Image: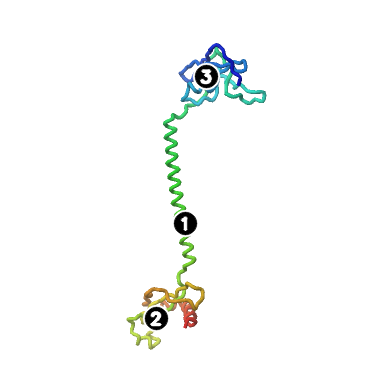
Amino acid sequence: MAQETHNIRFQKVKWGDSTAQIETVISNGIECLRLEDVQRHFHTVIVKAFLIDNVQKAFIHDGTGKNSEPLRIVAHLDKTVEVVGSIGAPENDIRSGIEELKVKVTRIDTNTQEILRQIANVMRQMYELHEFTTPRYFFILPAKHSDMMLIDTVQNWFQTHYKLYFLCECSHDPKEMHVAPHEGYSIKKGRDFVVKYAPYLRTTLQIVQVLL
């Protein structure tokens, strides 16, 4: 922008109840009022446009309608230019808002990390569940303290205290199966147990036959 020296002249500018005299500049032979000069004086205001006699003035622009830089209007020294704008947030409020935003971002990041940790734990548990399944095959034996004489007759089979032992399925090869390291689970209602788990017992007996 070509700018020439000239005798200092001022444009009367008003914002609300506040009035100021803003120095004008000569640009390409035209006396102008620059938006940045007005903004610098009314620093708490976000200056958007100018009014003269309640008519919004267009910024100086080129032949294509594009505003020239810096933004400026033709000065009218015999008139009062009114500022169109809004109150900007005080610097302290802006800083406070930025700090609050930082705290929220930190909290979100912490929550995200916790969610990722929980997801990782769930995935690990799912993997372990797939790799280390609950034993499906088992067999039963009379408990050590049971009276062995009672199992001599079929009528007494369901009166005997039994214990259930699982077969560990670490390998898919039946010959590699072995008794899981546990002292066994008590079965005091033998009849109910047999009725409920008869299909599993048949499969388990087949595996035991292979092992033997």
Report the mark closest to the observer, 1 or 3. Answer: 1
Question: Which residue is located at x 61 percent, y 24 percent?
Answer: 68
Question: Which residue is located at x 43 percent, y 44 percent?
Answer: 106
Q: In the image, what residue type sits under mark 2?
A: Leu
Circle 1/circle 3 CB separation < 8 Å: no
In the image, 88 versus 103, the foreground residue is 103
* Res 141 label: 2
Q: In the image, what residue type sits under mark 3?
A: Glu
Category of crowding for the residue at label 3, using alpha-carbon neighbours closer than 10 angstroms: few (below 14), some (14–19), many (at least 20): many
For marks 1 and 3 on the same chain, the one whose residue lies earlier in the sequence: 3
Circle 1/circle 2 CB separation < 8 Å: no
Category of crowding for the residue at label 2, using alpha-carbon neighbours closer than 10 angstroms: few (below 14), some (14–19), many (at least 20): some
Q: How has the structure been colored for display?
A: rainbow
Residue 99: give x, y in percent of width and height.
42, 37
Q: Which residue is mark 3?
A: 82
Q: Which residue is mark 1?
A: 120
For marks 3 and 2 on the same chain, the one whose residue lies earlier in the sequence: 3
CA distance for labels 3 and 2:
101 Å
What is the quadrant of residue 193 in the picture?
Answer: bottom left
Question: Which residue is located at x 57 percent, y 14 percent?
Answer: 5
Residue 125: give x, y in percent of width and height.
46, 61
**What is the secondary structure assignment of the residue under circle 3?**
strand
Residue 35: give x, y in percent of width and height.
54, 22
